[in-house]
Amino acid sequence: MEERIIMGIDPGTNLLGYGILAFKGKEASVLAMGVIDMRKCRDVHEKLGRIYDRVKMLIETFHPQVMAIEAPFFGKNVQSMLKLGRAQGVAIAAAISGNVKVYEYAPTKIKMAITGQGAASKEQVARMLQHILNISAHAMLPYLDATDALGVAYCHFLEDKKTKTSITSTNWKDFVAKNKSRIAVSDTKKE
């Protein structure tokens, strides 16, 4: 069975979380999780450069097939949104330059996939992932950005699995052609 590697990114300009999961069938294992800490860096362009370099290095080290990234949420602070969008864009650019396909997921979708509640807290997501992925207490990081990133990666795994098991017909004609055994034919004739 082929191993599938998914990188998850929780974008940020002070702390950017990353999580890398390996999947063999239904079994998931954590290859890496952590944060890119840019709190001491004052220059915004240096921060963006650091994000690009570190994400690129993670891609070159772990060779993920896809990167799942948390989509920006709409808040009231426009400046924060712009900074977050820049961080997200740089991480996506690093993935594209490494020929890694990118998928975006809304925060509520990620929380729903992991906990069953779209309004779950970061702590609830972390506890659920600790249980699902069998992460020991001492391996857990104090930064919830890292477990958020694992959550994005795990969410993509679940969404990808759903897509592969659902009907993929694009229209009724295709569906009928692919499912002839499911179509009932009537022998009644019009008079």
Image (spheres, rainbow, N blue to C red):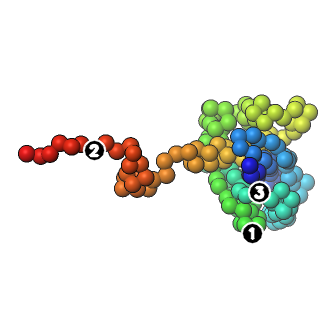
Please provide percent x and percent y for residue 5.
76, 52
Judged from the image, the secondary structure of the residue bearing numbered disc 3 is: loop
Quarter location, residue 64: bottom right
Q: Which is more N-terminal, label 3 or label 1?
A: 3
Q: Residues within 10 Å of mark 3 (few under 14, many from 20)?
A: many
**Number of the label disc, if any, that sits on residue 185:** 2
* Amino acid type of the residue that numbered disc 1 sits on in the rendered structure: Ser
Q: CA distance from mark 1 to mark 2?
A: 53 Å
Please provide percent x and percent y for residue 132.
75, 33
Please report the residue visible at 49 percent of the width from the left and 52 percent of the height from the top: 168
Judged from the image, the secondary structure of the residue bearing numbered disc 1 is: helix
* Amino acid type of the residue that numbered disc 2 sits on in the rendered structure: Val
Mark 1 touches mark 3? (CB < 8 Å): no
Question: Which mark's residue is nearer the viewer, 2 or 3?
Answer: 2
| Pointer 3 residue | 64
Q: Residues within 10 Å of mark 2 (few under 14, many from 20)?
A: few
Q: Nearer the viewer, residue 13 or 109?
A: 109
Q: Is residue 94 above or below residue 181?
A: below
Please provide percent x and percent y for residue 88.
71, 57
Does 48 sit left or right of 152 as displayed? right
Please provide percent x and percent y for residue 84.
71, 55
Quarter of the image for the C terminus: give it: top left
Q: Which is more N-terminal, label 2 or label 1?
A: 1
Please report the residue visible at 43 percent of the width from the left and 52 percent of the height from the top: 178
**Number of the label disc, if any, that sits on residue 97:** 1
Please report the residue visible at 58 percent of the width from the left and 48 percent of the height from the top: 164
